[in-house]
Amino acid sequence: MTQIAPRPQATVRMPLLREVYGRLLRGLRTRQARTLAEVAARAGISVAYLSEVERGLKEPSSEVLEAVCVALGSSITGLVGAAHRELRDLTTDGTSTGGRVLDLTSRAGSSIVAPLDATTPTGTVADTTGSVLLAA
């Protein structure tokens, strides 16, 4: 009787932060029906570089992220918040975790807390006035 070796299970890796930022920025730009050239010009970066940022191939500086966010009418705070929520809801196998996360936004200081019940969809950040800053 021949035995067949088990296939190694394909592991789904967690996305890199630059990939999440890129996906969020591209989503916002395309929802606004704006071109790479338009946003890159407003942000003061090249079209090629913005394209690489959106595809998660480049690790942009905080200054570049801020410039792109402003060019899109958003903020870096909204981008970081949306990325936090997206990553918080994933485990290494790509499924929802529902577990505990390190909450760096707590006013009482950083603590490990269970995820909050979001009133806005995942990937959407609302400021205190209720206006949407960044949506995934």
Image (cartoon, rainbow, N blue to C red):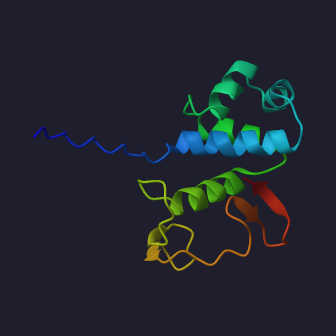
Report which quarter residue 29 is drawn in: top right
On the image, the x and y values in percent for residue 110 come to 47, 72
Answer yes or no: is residue 46 visible. no
Answer yes or no: is residue 6 visible. yes
Relative placement, left or right, of 32 versus 90 is: right
On the image, the x and y values in percent for residue 24 come to 69, 46
Does residue 87 sit above or below 63 in this rendering? below
Disc tally is 0
Relative placement, left or right, of 24 versus 94 is: right
Residue ID at (59%, 36%): 61
Residue ID at (75%, 38%): 68
Report which quarter residue 120 is drawn in: bottom right
The one of 33 and 77 positioned closer to us in this rendering: 33
Residue ID at (14%, 41%): 3
Does residue 64 sit above or below 14 in this rendering? above
Residue ID at (76%, 55%): 135
The one of 81 and 19 positioned closer to us in this rendering: 19
Does residue 5 sit above or below 41 in this rendering? below
Judged from this view, the residue extending furthest toward the left is 1
